[in-house]
Image (cartoon, rainbow, N blue to C red):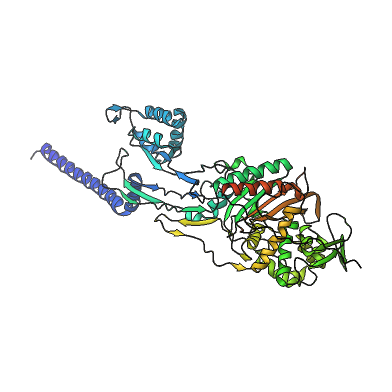
């Protein structure tokens, strides 16, 4: 074999070896790569693939409605949709994508979406580009929220594979500010006030989910979808009457303005404790709560405590009657001022010694007379009655933000404060506590819990109502009746023509209370709380009405609240078609004359 031939064969062998080596090297690289993909990084790569392909969408449940006693809707959730987009799919799309029988580029799509939703297409595109700059592989962007039904249908009909429409109900309040202070409102993620907050457990929905795989063009892969349905929230029915509530708000605002008062609060309650209306002079529209001052977004009827003043005397009088230490006809000589070691009590206006009966002392709202009547009553017995009337604890409504005002231990009170409590000073109460205490007098002496919630009906139709129970007897039926009969004389003999309503027996007590400085340093001479609380009809008690005004300027005595009380009672008579009384007011002497020799 020639040298040339041998060289040629040697070159071929080396070429074969080299090819084999290269082939083996490539095979080794492939094997290593395959092992890396299938063994080392398999879990991470699978997760990444699932993240690109798998989609989980929330199915929002619908929060339940809030309705009044007659079914009038005060709060409800309406269907709205969020328009979301997969930015990374728009990045890869080219002009001329088929859409049914015509073509629509991403730019054209944004123009149409903008026309449907009222958004600027340039702004929409800027949002997408900003999201892609943040994350080139972004698979989610909320582009537009709050689409209504017509907008939803129009966007859906565009047939865009990278656009998704998600049902997201929104809260609306059809009645606006009517009962807004009671209904409350929602924040971005949770209830913030009122019934929305206190009854959240009933109203809340449980969200569901929709899970599916998505193809390269962003459309769901058939057969890949699984769904967990949402569970809608329950419906809360209130005891209030929206029509009465509206008119009570109008009257409370009217008289707050006429009196130039800081605020006004009024309550209507049935004799069984159900609340018909709670009106505030400063209201909140839950559709736009930020338009109201933060102090006006709740209900002062539950959240503000005041020294009640003379409307509290009705409970002191009832306690003494029930203990048997007085009768309405007991006769006393009542000076303007009562003094004892360490104490001094006087009436609002100076007067000569009056020959008043016990009934006359209550009707004439005599502080010194009340103290004289109470001399035989132990402080422990008195505070036991106050506790049973409902003072010292939150009302059964348990309203969001409701203030709890504890009764102070009488053993820790000085002698002056112990006496002051008899006429509503040195003790604080919320308006709802006061109305609820008058309910006991209207209900034959039995205190029933105040109720604002009639019941909760869940998504399955099961109704849960608050337990009412038999209530607690505070005073005897006779005591309650006699107290109301005495208070009738306030209406008939007070001297205000606007107090009585012809044909109806009405019991009421007026009050003018000093208001303490917020730091507790004493009483502010420029602030008074004027009020009227009452029950009617006395011969068949049905309603309690309370109206209070903080710091009135035009009339600073309780007489300023009488026209409001009159109009509110008249409203209830008309609205509920209450028939006139069928019995006459009994004659109870208010004064007495000493026997002449």
Q: Nearer the viewer, residue 430 or 303?
A: 430
Q: In which quarter of the image is residue 288?
A: top right
Q: Where is residue 547 in the image (x, y as percent from the top left)?
A: 68, 50
Q: Nearer the viewer, residue 107 or 589?
A: 589
Residue found farthest to the right? 597
Q: Which residue is drawn at 83% across and 55% down?
A: 348
Taking the image as drawn, is residue 307 in sight?
no
Q: Position of residue 542 (x, y in %)?
A: 60, 57
Q: Which residue is drawn at 80% across and 54% down?
A: 523
Q: Nearer the viewer, residue 596 or 44?
A: 596
Side of 447 where 459 appears, left or right: left
Taking the image as drawn, is residue 513 in sight?
yes
Side of 503 where 260 appears, left or right: right
Q: In which quarter of the image is residue 519?
A: bottom right
Q: In this view, does 252 lie above or below 493?
A: above
Residue found farthest to the left? 1
Side of 516 where 484 appears, left or right: left
Residue found farthest to the front? 597
Q: In this view, does 83 lie above or below 303?
A: above
Q: Position of residue 12 (x, y in %)?
A: 15, 40
Q: How many marks?
A: 0
Side of 67 where 271 appears, left or right: right
Q: Where is residue 495 in the image (x, y as percent from the top left)?
A: 77, 50
Q: In which quarter of the image is the N terminus?
A: top left
Q: Quadrant of the C terminus?
A: bottom right
């Amino acid at each position: 074999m020639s040298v040339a031939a041998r060289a040629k064969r040697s070159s071929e062998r080396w070429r074969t070896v080299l090819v084999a080596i290269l082939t083996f090297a490539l095979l080794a690289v492939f094997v290593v790569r395959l092992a890396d993909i299938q063994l080392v990084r398999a879990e991470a790569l699978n997760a990444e693939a699932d993240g690109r392909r798998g989609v989980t969408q929330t199915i929002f449940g619908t929060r339940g409605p809030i309705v009044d006693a007659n079914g009038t809707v005060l709060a409800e959730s309406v269907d709205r949709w969020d328009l979301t987009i997969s930015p990374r799919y728009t990045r890869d799309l080219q002009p001329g994508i088929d859409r049914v029988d015509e073509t629509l580029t991403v730019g054209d799509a944004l123009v149409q979406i903008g026309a449907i939703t009222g958004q600027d297409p340039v702004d929409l595109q800027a949002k997408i580009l900003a999201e892609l700059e943040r994350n080139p592989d972004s698979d989610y962007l909320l582009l537009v929220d709050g689409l209504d039904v017509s907008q939803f249908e129009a966007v859906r009909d565009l047939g865009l594979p990278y656009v998704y429409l998600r049902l997201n109900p929104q809260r609306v309040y059809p009645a606006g500010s009517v009962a807004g202070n009671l209904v409350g409102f929602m924040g971005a993620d949770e209830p913030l006030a009122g019934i929305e907050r206190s009854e959240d457990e009933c109203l809340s929905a449980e969200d569901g989910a929709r899970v599916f795989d998505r193809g390269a063009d962003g459309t769901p892969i058939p057969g890949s979808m699984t769904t967990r349905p949402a569970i809608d929230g329950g419906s809360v029915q209130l005891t209030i009457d929206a029509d009465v509530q509206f008119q009570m708000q109008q009257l409370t605002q009217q008289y707050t303005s006429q009196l130039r008062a800081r605020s006004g609060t009024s309550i209507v309650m049935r004799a069984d404790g159900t609340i018909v209306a709670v009106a505030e002079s400063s209201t909140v529209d839950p559709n736009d709560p930020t338009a109201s001052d933060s102090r006006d977004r709740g209900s002062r009827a539950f959240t503000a405590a005041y020294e009640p003043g003379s409307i509290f005397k009705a409970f002191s009088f009832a306690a003494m009657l029930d203990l048997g230490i007085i009768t309405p006809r007991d006769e006393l000589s009542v000076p303007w001022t009562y003094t004892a070691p360490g104490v001094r009590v006087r009436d609002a206006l100076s007067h000569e010694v009056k020959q008043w009966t016990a009934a006359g002392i209550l009707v004439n709202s005599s502080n010194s007379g009340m103290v004289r009547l109470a001399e035989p009553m132990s402080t422990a017995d008195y505070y036991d009655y106050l506790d049973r009337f409902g003072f010292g604890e939150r009302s059964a409504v348990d309203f969001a933000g409701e203030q709890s005002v504890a009764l102070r231990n009488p053993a820790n009170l000085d002698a002056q404060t112990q006496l002051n409590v008899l006429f509503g000073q040195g003790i604080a109460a919320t308006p709802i506590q006061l109305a609820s205490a008058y309910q006991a007098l209207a209900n034959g002496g039995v205190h029933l819990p105040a109720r604002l919630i009639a019941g909760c009906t869940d998504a399955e139709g099961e109704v849960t109502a608050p337990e009412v129970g038999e209530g607690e007897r505070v005073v005897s039926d006779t005591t309650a009746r006699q107290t109301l009969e005495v208070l009738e004389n306030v209406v008939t003999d007070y001297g205000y023509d606007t107090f009585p309503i012809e044909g109806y027996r009405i019991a009421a007590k007026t009050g003018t209370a000093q208001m303490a400085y917020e730091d507790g340093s004493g009483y502010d001479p420029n602030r008074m709380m004027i009020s009227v609380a009452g029950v009617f009809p006395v011969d068949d008690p049905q309603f309690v009405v309370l109206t209070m005004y903080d710091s009135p300027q035009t009339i600073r005595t309780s007489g300023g609240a009488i026209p409001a009380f009159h109009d509110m009672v008249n409203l209830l008579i008309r609205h509920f078609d209450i028939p006139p009384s069928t019995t006459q007011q009994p004659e109870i002497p208010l004064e007495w004359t000493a026997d002449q020799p």
